[in-house]
Structures are given as structure tokens and as C-alpha cells.
Image: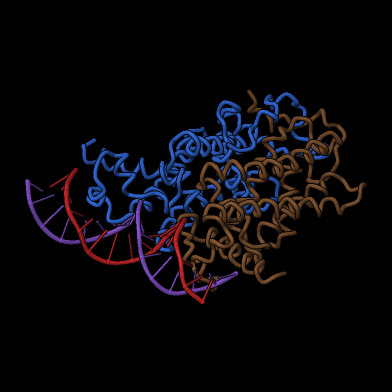
Chain colours: A brown, B blue, C red, D purple
Amino acid sequence: MKKSERTRKRILDAAAHWLTHKGLAATSLRELAEETNIRTASIYYYFESKDALVEEVLRIGIEVVHQSVKERVEMLGEEVSFQQRIETAITAHLYALLMHGNYTSAHILNYSFVSLDIRQRVLKVRREYGEYWQDLLEQAQKAGDIAPYVDLGLLRLFLIGALNWSVEWFDAEVKSVERLAKDCCKMIFNGISGHSTSAGVTRHDVLTCPSSTITHDR
Amino acid sequence: MKKSERTRKRILDAAAHWLTHKGLAATSLRELAEETNIRTASIYYYFESKDALVEEVLRIGIEVVHQSVKERVEMLGEEVSFQQRIETAITAHLYALLMHGNYTSAHILNYSFVSLDIRQRVLKVRREYGEYWQDLLEQAQKAGDIAPYVDLGLLRLFLIGALNWSVEWFDAEVKSVERLAKDCCKMIFNGISGHSTSAGVTRHDVLTCPSSTITHDR
DNA sequence: GTCTATAGATAGATAGAC
DNA sequence: GTCTATCTATCTATAGAC
């Protein structure tokens, strides 16, 4: 890696760090320059503007998660169950989110505040990742691993939302990423109800169920 | 309500709006004053500083949700099942979040960026709300409505995280708050698995909304 | 309570030397 | 590639009249 590329990366790293901890408007090029040991004006050699720098951080923030998830799911063999694939996807998402730096959290925390221009361009990258999950979930539903009644769009938004929020509370000393992913997956697949059959036990008589758990349907 | 109180409220409303849509540092007292039809200096008659104003918005953002949830759950009779109580709590949380203004979203989107002082004080109010949910979930587990294997702390963070994230994608024209709450509750309690823990999957007509109509983002 | 006026700090961005 | 110097704009906050 050339020195010029390294400098560029150091600016991006500093930006991701400040965007995560201070927010968009409180992230000043002066402080980024100080942290990178260059002068403010030198940033403009690498980036056209503050907006361009921020846009790249946000874009990387999604791409790194998307790539991580895709890679690790594809590494699984063909015969692996969809529940296992989804657990792997959750693990990979959490890993990229929690362990691999500030780019993704910078994205999550600042997306609402960047200019409309940036938001629209970054939205494309977001959509691609959303569609990856949507495909995964649809395949799982077709294969019968997800019940037909489930609204996959809602599931996707609900799941990714919950995972993204973990940047606010995750603590590796309380629960590891793998453990967290496994527990989330179990909760999502088996449900939390105390009235159904015990978690993980396969039932074939799906047409019968304790009515008490659905009595509030109207 | 006195004129002075109304002016104060108009400043708070404007602040909540700007904090939600532009973020902490991009929310300037000048623009708040303009939106409130007063001069910048007049804001200092009502609030000691920008920080004090922001802190009050964030505090209200939690309190309004906490109160809404508490009220609506307490309105339910004693004999109501815990699953129903939790669905009511989810509905109330979403209502306060999505329908009743920008205070809560201002909190969610800016909490990471406010000064340590504010964050620590606001954290107390947050904790109180978290404890309310923890109590509710513990009672449900004791009553047998939530399975013993469930990590209630994880469930609480997962659930509230997913709900809070809905500010990013909720669209009342796609799915109403009540419908959304009901569907979330069903998914959480019954699980999404197509194979096991079958409680509830007898009703395949529960989710009427085609997932494709849910927007990825706004 | 609301105003005018302004102090004092800091922001993004540019010009041009080296 | 990196620098110094600086322009222009905007910010929070204060002083003091009315």
C-alpha cells in the first residue's frame, strides 16, 4: 500500500471514529487533520469536500457488512439448513458491526443527518444489502424453514433494526458475538412463548395449537 | 396555558423537530428562533444554554413513551394475559414513537452525540423505562407466558431496539401502528420457524400485507 | 419578555508557495 | 503532497436598552 493510500485511509479512519462518537456536524476537518498529523488543507488533496469524505465513510460502512455477511454465508456448504445460514448471517452482521471499526456505526448514527444528495446515493448501497437479506429470507420461506404466515419485509426490518441497535448496548464481556447471534436466532425462530412446545422440538401437527396463545386475534 | 409557557413549548417543539431532521450540531438557536418567531437571544430567557434545551427535549422524549406505555398497560384489567399486556406495551411504545412528534426520535438519534453530562442524567430516565419493561417481562416469565429459556435482558434490548429503529422505515400507509404491533408480537411470541414450536402457525391469514410493499428506507 | 448589537470562537474552503 | 495564511460564514452566548 502506497503512502498516499495510507494517508487517505488514516483520514477515513479518523472520520469514521469522529462521526461515531461526535456526530456529523461536530466532526471538523481540523480535528481529523490533527488526528492524522497533517494540516486541514491537505485533506482537500484526498477529498473534494467534507461531504465527499462523509459519503465514503457511510458507503464503506454498509459495504463492509454486506461483504462480510455474503462471504461467510457462501462459505457454508449447499446442504446447510436455512436456519443455520441465517444464524451465520446474523453473526457476520454483528461481527462487522461490533468488531470491525466505526464505519458502520458512523453510517447508522449519521444517515438521518447527511444531505439529501448523499442519502440518496447511499440508499442504493443500503437497498442492495436489504435485498440480499430479502432473498435469503425468501429462500428460507420457500424451503419451509420460515413459516408461511411471516411477513418477510417486516422480519427483515425488525431483525436488522434490532441488530443495528446493538451498537448502543453490546458488551463483549457479557456475551460474545457468537453467543449473542445464537441466542437471537433461537429467540426469533422458536419464539418466546411459554405455552408452545419446548424450543427446538419438531412438531408435525402444525394444525393444532393451544388456542390460548392466539385468543387476542380479532 | 400562559403565553410564556406556550412560547417555551414552541421552542421545544422546534428543537425536537430540528434535532430529529438535522442532528445536534446542525440545530442552531438562530433557526429555532426564526421558526418560533422570536430572536436568538430570547431563547436564553427560557433556557440556560443550548445544552439545557437539548437535555429537556431528550428527557421528554423518554418520559412521553414511558408514560404512554404505563398508562395503556395499566388500563388493561387484571385478568388480561401477559402476551396481551406486552402487545399493548408495544403498541403504546410505537404510538408514542411514531405518532406523537419528534421528541423521542430526537432522543434516539442524538443520544450518542450529546455531552457526557447530559448523557449521564438522561440515562437515569432511560433506565427507569428499561426497568419498567424488565419488570413486565419478568412477570410474564413467572406466569409462564414467556418460556424459561429466554434471556429477558436480551429480549428487552432486542425488542426495544427493533421498535426504535422503526422510526427509519415506518410508513402508516403500509401498515398501521396497531397492525404492526400485533404482527411484531406474533412473530416474537410464536417464532418464525416453519418446523417447530408451532403455537400460532395455524393462522396463515394473520399478516395481510405483502412484504414487497414495505419500503426499505424512507 | 423581547429586542439590537456584538463579542469571541470555530467552521469549511481556497490560494498559492514549496 | 503538504504546507501557511486567510476569506467568509456561522455558531453560542452576553450586555444592556426598552
* Horizontal arrangement in the rendering, residue A173 relative to residue B55 (left or right): right
Residue B123 seen in the figure: no
* Horizontal arrangement in the rendering, residue A23 relative to residue A73 (left or right): left
User: Residue at the right extreme?
Assistant: A79
Looking at the rendered image, the quarter that the C terminus of chain B falls into is: top right
Task: Out of B8 and A19, give the one closest to the viewer.
Answer: A19
Kindly identify the residue that appears in the image at 85 percent across and 51 percent down.
A74
Count how many numbered circles sit on residues in the image: 0
* Horizontal arrangement in the rendering, residue B152 relative to residue B149 (left or right): left
Residue B211 drawn at (x, y percent): 70, 30
Kindly identify the residue that appears in the image at 40 percent across and 59 percent down.
B118
Residue A13 drawn at (x, y percent): 60, 64
* Horizontal arrangement in the rendering, residue A217 relative to residue B18 (left or right): right
Q: Is residue A97 above or below residue A2?
A: above
* Figure quadrant of residue A20: bottom right
Task: Out of A99 and A59, give the one closest to the viewer.
Answer: A59
Task: Out of B128 and A85, give the one closest to the viewer.
Answer: A85
Kindly identify the residue that appears in the image at 53 percent across and 66 percent down.
A42
Kindly identify the residue that appears in the image at 62 percent across and 69 percent down.
A7
Residue B122 seen in the figure: yes
* Figure quadrant of residue A146: top right
Residue A202 drawn at (x, y percent): 86, 41
Looking at the rendered image, the quarter that the N terminus of chain B falls into is: top left
Task: Out of B139 and B98, give the one closest to the viewer.
Answer: B98
